[in-house]
Amino acid sequence: MNRKGLLAIASNLFGKLYADKGYIGKEFSQKMKDNGIDLVTRVRKNMKTVVHSECDQALLRKRSLVETVFDELKNLCHIEHTRHRSPMNFAVNLMAGIVAYCLQPVKPRIAVWDCRDPLAVN
């Protein structure tokens, strides 16, 4: 997804958005901040280090797990088919892929905890 598309999708959102290095840029980050979104990314090798909270660092490390789920949905559950002839066929294919994913016996998991209390485990 390109930056313009992200700006359009996130126009009604607020909070933090965790993205990859492709979304780094002062101008783009400022536009996101003006919309109420704090863009959290890793830095490139030639950039100054940015200090993130422990919670942000942990969530950035979990991005690969989210990308794994997206890959499984697209490749194993076949939800990326784009030649549907009607919106109903698209919706049926999407729901079938999501149900197929939910029925998989082993799925990636993220351990969730309250970042404000490092001793609490949910």
Image: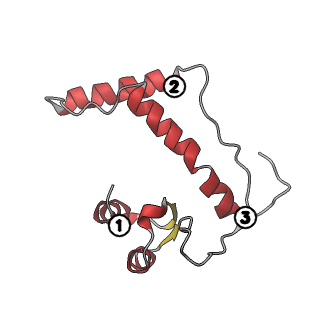
Give the x, y percent position of residue 87: 19, 33
Q: CA distance from mark 1 to mark 3?
A: 27 Å
Residue 67, horizontal then vertical, whole percent: 50, 43
In this rendering, the answer to whether 71 lies above or below 93 is below
Q: Is tag 2's residue or tag 3's residue first in the polypeptide sequence?
A: 3
- Secondary element at image label 2: helix
Q: Quadrant of residue 28?
A: bottom left
Q: Residues within 10 Å of mark 1 (few under 14, many from 20)?
A: few
Tell me whether the residue at label 2 lies in contact with that at label 1, contact meaning CB atoms closer than 8 angstroms: no
The amino acid at mark 3 is Glu
**Residue at mark 3:** 54
Vertical comparison of 47 with 41: above or below: below
Residue type of the residue flagged with mark 1: Ser
Residue shown at 44% from the left, 75% from the top: 29
- Which residue is found at the position 43% from the left and 24% from the top? 76
Q: Residue at x 35, y 66 (%)?
A: 11
- Local secondary structure at mark 3: helix
Helix, strand, or loop for circle 1? helix
* Mark in front: 2 vs 3: 3
Residue position marked by numbered label 2 in the rendering = 102
Mark 1, residue position? 11
Local crowd size for mark 3, using a 10 Å CA cut-off: few (<14), some (14–19), many (≥20) = few
For the residues labelled 2 and 3, the Cα–Cα distance comes to: 31 Å
Amino acid type assigned to the residue bearing label 2 in the image: Cys
Nearer to the camera, 104 or 12? 104
| Quadrant position of residue 89 | top left
